[in-house]
Amino acid sequence: QVQVVESGGGLVQPGGSLRLSCAASGFTLRYYAIGWFRQAPGKEREGVSCISSSDGSTYYADSVKGRFTISRDNAKNTVYLQMNSLKPEDTAVYYCATPGAPFVDMTIATMTAMSHYWGQGTQVTVSS
């Protein structure tokens, strides 16, 4: 059974950092694309970043480029989202998701439509 579970959210001051984790179970993560999404109150869910299954290519939304880094630890079956220089507008519930099939890759443009297995989300609040 494909499952992903997010953790690592919390309250941080503007300019601070957080690292989110997306732990996979029921599948070998190295063969699957993983995406990070976020949804702020009253706003649509948006794709933030994704990492491909084939060659580890990474993709970022313009709003986070240069501040967020996605990475994968195959030994721990976990994908991370390192978030630096956080801004109040980064406040949202963050979700990870996967297509749920191996060797199916995503980009920022396609990740929403292609993600079928979702975690429960973790809250990130950036405030002084």
Image: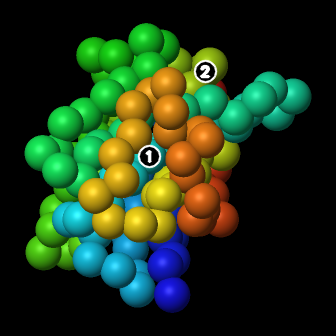
Tell me: 55 left or right of 15.
left
Query: Distance from label 2 to label 1 (Cα)?
Result: 22 Å
61 in relation to 50, above or below: above
33 in relation to 29, above or below: above
Mark 2: few, some, or many residues within 10 Å (few <14, many ≥20)?
some
Image coords of residue 63 (percent x, y): 48, 14
Q: Amino acid at mark 2?
A: Pro
Mark 1: few, some, or many residues within 10 Å (few <14, many ≥20)?
many
Tell me what residue is drawn at x 19 percent, y 36 percent: 57
Element marked by disc 1:
strand
Tell me: 72 left or right of 83.
left
Tell me what residue is drawn at x 44 percent, y 20 percent: 61
Instruction: Look at mark 2 in the image and give the residue it sits on.
Output: 88
Tell me: 28 left or right of 47.
left
Tell me what residue is drawn at x 40 percent, y 86 percent: 26
Report the front residue among 84 and 73.
73
Instruction: Look at mark 1 in the image and give the residue it sits on.
Output: 35
